[in-house]
Image (cartoon, coloured by chain):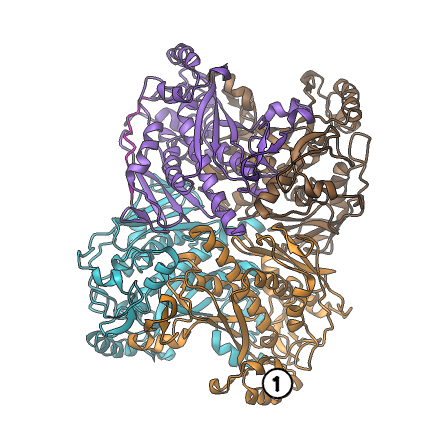
Chain colours: A orange, B cyan, C purple, D brown
Amino acid sequence: MSFNSFGHLFRFTTWGESHGPALGAVVDGCPPGLALAEEDIQPWLDKRRPGTSRFTTQRQEPDRVRILSGTFEGRTTGTPISLMIDNVDQRSKDYSEVAVAYRPGHADYAYDAKYGFRDYRGGGRSSARETAARVAAGAVARAVIPEVRIRAYLVEMGGDAIDPAAFDDAAIDANPFFCPDPGAAERWIDILDEARKAGSSLGAVVECVATGVPAGWGAPVYAKLDAELASACMSINAVKGVEIGDGFAAARLRGEGNADAMRPGADGRPLFLANHAGGIAGGIATGQPIVLRVALKPTSSILTPVETIDRTGNAAEIRTKGRHDPCVGIRAAPVVEAMMALVLADQKLMHRGQCG
Amino acid sequence: MSFNSFGHLFRFTTWGESHGPALGAVVDGCPPGLALAEEDIQPWLDKRRPGTSRFTTQRQEPDRVRILSGTFEGRTTGTPISLMIDNVDQRSKDYSEVAVAYRPGHADYAYDAKYGFRDYRGGGRSSARETAARVAAGAVARAVIPEVRIRAYLVEMGGDAIDPAAFDDAAIDANPFFCPDPGAAERWIDILDEARKAGSSLGAVVECVATGVPAGWGAPVYAKLDAELASACMSINAVKGVEIGDGFAAARLRGEGNADAMRPGADGRPLFLANHAGGIAGGIATGQPIVLRVALKPTSSILTPVETIDRTGNAAEIRTKGRHDPCVGIRAAPVVEAMMALVLADQKLMHRGQCG
Amino acid sequence: MSFNSFGHLFRFTTWGESHGPALGAVVDGCPPGLALAEEDIQPWLDKRRPGTSRFTTQRQEPDRVRILSGTFEGRTTGTPISLMIDNVDQRSKDYSEVAVAYRPGHADYAYDAKYGFRDYRGGGRSSARETAARVAAGAVARAVIPEVRIRAYLVEMGGDAIDPAAFDDAAIDANPFFCPDPGAAERWIDILDEARKAGSSLGAVVECVATGVPAGWGAPVYAKLDAELASACMSINAVKGVEIGDGFAAARLRGEGNADAMRPGADGRPLFLANHAGGIAGGIATGQPIVLRVALKPTSSILTPVETIDRTGNAAEIRTKGRHDPCVGIRAAPVVEAMMALVLADQKLMHRGQCG
Amino acid sequence: MSFNSFGHLFRFTTWGESHGPALGAVVDGCPPGLALAEEDIQPWLDKRRPGTSRFTTQRQEPDRVRILSGTFEGRTTGTPISLMIDNVDQRSKDYSEVAVAYRPGHADYAYDAKYGFRDYRGGGRSSARETAARVAAGAVARAVIPEVRIRAYLVEMGGDAIDPAAFDDAAIDANPFFCPDPGAAERWIDILDEARKAGSSLGAVVECVATGVPAGWGAPVYAKLDAELASACMSINAVKGVEIGDGFAAARLRGEGNADAMRPGADGRPLFLANHAGGIAGGIATGQPIVLRVALKPTSSILTPVETIDRTGNAAEIRTKGRHDPCVGIRAAPVVEAMMALVLADQKLMHRGQCG
């Protein structure tokens, strides 16, 4: 069923709200004997951590992770790994406005429609703070797939795209945008400063590439590797689109332009002459890099007043004060990486289970 | 786990290969007491059926569905509904070429990498014939959600988009392309004839809209309604991208441009002034129409020879003869509708289960 | 969710009613490359087949299985294996009585309470004919675990137990009761003839032993091997109890009497001095034989009239005419074997998936 | 998959080891709007708490539960409920012996066989401390099914059974054994004192009855209510057998003796004249009380030395010092109640989901 779980054989469950005492993840099905300590998880959380530049929310959360179970003497035991992160900076602000009026673009109205009421403090369960738990779980997943390297970065912000020819892997961690194009990163400073000062927000496109995935991981039909990745990424807050390989651009190609021709390569494996497919055919990895892109809408929390209604159905107007990311797409990059890792770890174990 | 199952409470499993004796679906968890006969399912299969125009494959499959279990005196009993469709037009052609060489863009190489060998006749399990079983299951799902109307159509073929201003619901079934813009449908005749005669193929974009979905269906986090839809659609053959509402275009909007403002509406429900979100917020339906689009790559089976390798790793060249859809996107429209229905039926039951 | 599915990585779904056109199973997650033909499945169905002696129902069902998908050139492909068995001997008797009155001990009343109505012909979905599909699926499972030998037999019928000292494996298939004690088998002829002629029925206890299960299969907590076996067996029609190893007798032992002491054995593996645990500790196989017993109630269909009510809530009396097994426990033995095989195949794949 | 999860729509996951910092449960799928506070959970934990009499382990654990998520203003929100219990009394004893030698009857050898190593402190994940998390989750389940009353008690200890005629509900909580027969409770004091002083241990049989379960909960075939209960109970530490209604005794009845005859009752519902079936027919509740019994082996931790082997395969001898329950069956009673509640809550939601 899994309202709050993801995965099959390698499976995790997250819990926690924006303004509760803590949040966490329980990772089940992890292979035994893997080296795992809090220090292996913390760096990934630090990449997603808020308050590291003026371009992300100023909420100050150390996001220190604790391992409460599932390891012994520094190694995973095969039993569930409970990860917990305390919430420390819940500002005791006045929530009376958001408690009664629905913020457009947020889940406020939908939650009330479903559950009858909601924890309105900081968005409750619908807050993107939940993604901290994914990143922690994703760090465990990485230990399961040491053969894979995963890299996510922004290829577009506010409609301004990078120049693929300027792609520089080393640049990604050298600017506050996970931007692989140093020139674009420069432009984005101004673009985002303008939006932030105007009380507005911007959308973004994140690309994620996984190299080292062996041909054969994945499965046909409903557990297709691309279907799992689409579900994983669409479940991230603010994501409105997912594409694999050429994605929507593939719909504009002709058959011969879309074919990934093959030649004999090393070890009898094919040398692919292109990767329009993004490393997946028939739901199964081909051994090429897995390539996906996700579209993130602009942050819904903006200072501009917007027409809305309140809980009694009367007209209201709302502007979202408080500390928000002017572009949620930035901090989504480590989350997309985590979801890629979590899907691949699961697929590795399932493939091994079925095919030995 | 569910390599070949989809859904949680309303759940279906499909089976069958392109050139086996039959294919089918087992639908589990269907509410009891719903009127259901083969005549309720057949019309949806007929919409997807091949060989109805020169723009689809000339394989002649009547696709007659039989209900083998789960109904009694014309009503569903609550027990599994077994649906079977015989394969009748499996041409006894020579498969020696495809048996040894991998067709680029197809799952041939990936299946061999995963399973060690494959049923190469017509693509085996990776054939889009599997989608007939989905359409049959989808017809059962429609009986579960009579309050919902679902409509899928092509908004783009070979890069040529419809004019939204020319949208005419009545036109969709009046041309062989499920095209809602009569002018575009005229153009597509020529576009697709050209590609077909050149032995090439075209991609397409299918849009699907579900109206009547009550606010509240769906769930936060990993069972998000949009995540389920993304998984459902990405699992369809040839799909390379999925977007909800404005999708990738939302990444180019500013926060105020993306906000779906609300005013008091009928029955205390909101009147939304826009639907950038595509009817889903925080993973839960808002009561607005659910809107999604999927990108389909051009058919991989083309007459143009392509470089490839054979099973022994040696260089080869392959051109795919046989009867193929010059644009798989056309027959995908009924399949997308089916997956929408299947997801919504499941979400309706889950919502009722949890929230009463 | 899985109302009609069982298993996790190796998973099957059954469908069909007693008086529908057919019944079947879809087996998903089967490893590829295993030799599998209809001839590998049929012998197991023949063991369960009705009408083979006067001690089972006289319904004549050939129970011929057909493989509709999932194999190619005699080997499993890793895709779903669809198995179908036609129903051929549905006697067109008068069901007007059972349609309106509830047979005590049967599911009639419970089905109506749940679903609002029911397929009353031969018990519909609640008929033990469903177990034919399990036996077919179980034959596939056997191909997954060639290292395991599974044997089920009756240790008690109508309260008359076998003499363990007289246990003779070769006797099991030499009498119509799967009875390993030739003396008991002789007695059971008279006991069952008496009950059958009196229009009554008898219960039984089936024991099942699996040898060759490697230490390590299984899992702690909720996927415990014994928990999976308990669920698998309790799901069989007429089963009212399941025990592992010494079972209920263990509750009467002292700690030192229940301990399975160990000595150094071959290959560094332990030589166990007893098997009170039935081969499972902490939910995980120890390498000893897996031993379980299930209790089956007497067939509920009896000629003796019983007080009951009808669908309108009025008093009625019912006696169940027709062709019934005087002791359902007999034909349950092959079903218990099948469920043991299905659980073990699943556990093997899950163990391989998690632990490599 | 769910190595450490249980349930479908109402689903919980537990984590934690005997000697880790804490243990807990995440409850997912809980309906919104239910009153729930820590004070609603604590009393059930107190019933299971160790150290309350000389007949249970002297380990002193307050077992204070904290709710970390999923409630707001005293009500459930429909999002995951994270429950945590700190471990406070982990005695820093010397584990060098149990680290190297396998305790017969315990999971030591099986864990090493499966995972390659294990957390040997207090049994790690295989410790019955895990059941504290079940009891906490079970308290949440009780809030979902206010119409149901659940009662578990011991009917047998060390082979000494209660007198059913002396059954007194009020007695259950008036002695340290959850024994409903005051006379038996007197006898058990001596019986258990003797075993405890001898360094031995005793087994027990726990019976559990749920009244108020409406006819219709449950499902046929693999999600049978009895199959779910069997799995739930067999997953409890030390359980070796489960029976429903008459259980194994039903195997000794004739058909007419086992029939639960019906007469017209109140509201058109049947008045059952017996309950051999234990309230379940065809996997579905009949409206009668659900009755089950579980057999628990004697505690494996005994002072009597037992032959065993060590991790290197050499002969060894082990006696289990430390603080242990002389009869684990006693503290199992609240755990069986919890599992009953958890299964029923899940079945209620699933029934509502499918059947409305």
* Residue D252 spot, x, y in % from top left: 51, 17
Q: Is residue B254 left or right of C187 when viewed as pictured?
A: right
Picture layout, residue D228 above or below residue B7: above
Residue D47 located within the stretch drawn in magenta = no
Q: Which residues are magenta?
A: C58-67
* Residue A19 spot, x, y in % from top left: 72, 64
* Residue C204 spot, x, y in % from top left: 47, 20
Question: Would residue C7 be visible to someone looking at this image?
Answer: no
Q: Which of the 4 quarters of the picture holds residue B221?
A: bottom right
The type of residue carrying mark 1 is Leu
Residue C64 located within the stretch drawn in magenta = yes
- Give me the residue at 48% from left, 20% from top: C155
Picture layout, residue C134 above or below residue B24: above
Viewer-side residue, C63 vs C70: C70
Residue indicated by mark 1: A192
Q: Which of the 4 quarters of the picture holds residue C186?
A: top left
- Secondary structure beneath dot 1 equals helix
